[in-house]
Each structure stands twice: as C-alpha cells, then as structure tokens.
Amino acid sequence: MNTPAITIRRLGADEALSSVEALAEVLVDCVHGGASVSFMAPLPFEKAMAFWRGVVEGVQRGERVLLVAENGEGRIVGTVQLITGLPENQPHRADVAKMLVHRRARRQGIAHRLMAAVDDVARAQGKTVLVLDTVTGGDAERLYERAGWVRVGCVPNYALMPDGAPCGTTFFCKQL
C-alpha cells in the first residue's frame, strides 16, 4: 500500500532521547492492544518510558539502531530496532526487536517499510544474518514471511500475552 505521508528514519542518540515519550505512547498502545512484546497489561507509562531510556543508552553505546516511522505531522507511529551489540563470535549477525506500529496507523504498509529499512541498515553495517521472534499464530508471522524471513522453529508457552495467557513464540531468520 502506498503511504506517502509516512517517513522512515534512523534516530541518533539525542533525537532518540527527545523521542522517549512518543515511543512510550506507541509501546503502551501496542501492549494495551494485546501485543506480546515483553510487557504485561496494563503497562504504566513511566515503565514504558524507562524501557525507552534504556534503548537510548544502547543507541548511545552503538549497540542498537533505532528506526521510527513518522506520519505527515512528524508524529512517531511505529518503530523497530536492530540490536548489533552481540558477542564477538557473531559480528555478522543482528537481532530485530520491538517492531511496533500504533493501532491507529496499522494497515498502511508501515510495518513492511520498517522491516525493509532495518534490512537496509543491517546490510550497510555488514550484517548477513538477522534473527527475530514473534507470537506464534499472530499477524506478524505473515508480515515476516512476505518480507523474506524463514521460520526456523516454535517454542510452545515461551512467553505470556499482556493479559497473562501463555503463548508460543516462533523464531525467524533472514540471510542478507
């Protein structure tokens, strides 16, 4: 789908720090919408802000790349991270994490564009293997498969949904 009003860009450490509140809004919305992204509902806004401050520290150390999707008004409506601070025997690999799109901005191709952008950043950094995980049976599985990711396995009852119900997790990889 064409989303000309959406801009995907990488945030440096200073911009990331000034965007903590907007990023927290996206995270809280996703968790309250039922996304299993490491947090339980209800997610207090301060806890979400603390999470993003930790992400900013990773960006400052060069261990994470933070990408955002902004709407035509410059408001953050989505985000994804590339975790590059991995053990020394994995310099060719990165993890993709916290691919989030605010519920009001879904079904506009934003997630697909974020995933394409994270691939581009990974390639530019010389990464050849990407790994991510998602809720088994969720909408994200189809997104990742359409974007060229390969399902490598599922672990039943790996995590909890925000309401406390157990859920399986499916692991994906992508060779760049």
Image (cartoon, grey):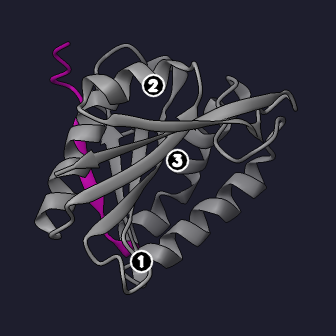
Comes first in the chain, label 3 or label 2? 3
Q: Mark 1 belongs to which amino acid?
A: Gly
Q: Nearer the viewer, mark 3 or mark 2?
A: 2
What's the residue at 21%, 65% (across, down)? 127
- CB contact under 8 Å: marks 1 and 2: no
Q: Is residue 126 left or right of residue 157?
A: left
What's the residue at 14%, 60% (across, down)? 123
Residue interval drawn in magenta = 1-13
Tell me the CA gap for discs 3 and 2.
26 Å
Q: Mark 3 belongs to which amino acid?
A: Ala
Q: Which residue is mark 3?
A: 22
> From what the image shows, is residue 95 above or below residue 141?
below
Q: Is residue 12 magenta?
A: yes
Look at the numbered disc 3 and give the secondary structure of its residue: helix
What's the residue at 28%, 21% (across, down)? 109
Q: Which residue is mark 1?
A: 85
What is the x, y in percent for residue 117? 21, 46
Q: Mark 2 belongs to which amino acid?
A: Glu
> From what the image shows, is residue 40 above or below residue 127?
above
In this view, the residue in front, 147 or 104, is 147
Tell me the CA gap for discs 3 and 1.
24 Å
Residue occupying the far front of the picture: 153
What is the x, y in percent for residue 42? 84, 36
The numbered disc on residue 168 is none
Q: Dot 3 surroundings within 10 Å: few (below 14), some, or many (20 or more)?
A: some
What is the x, y in percent for residue 115? 29, 39
Residue occupying the far right of the picture: 164
Q: Which residue is mark 2?
A: 141
Tell me the CA gap for discs 1 and 2.
25 Å
Q: Quadrant of the N terminus?
A: top left
Comes first in the chain, label 1 or label 2? 1
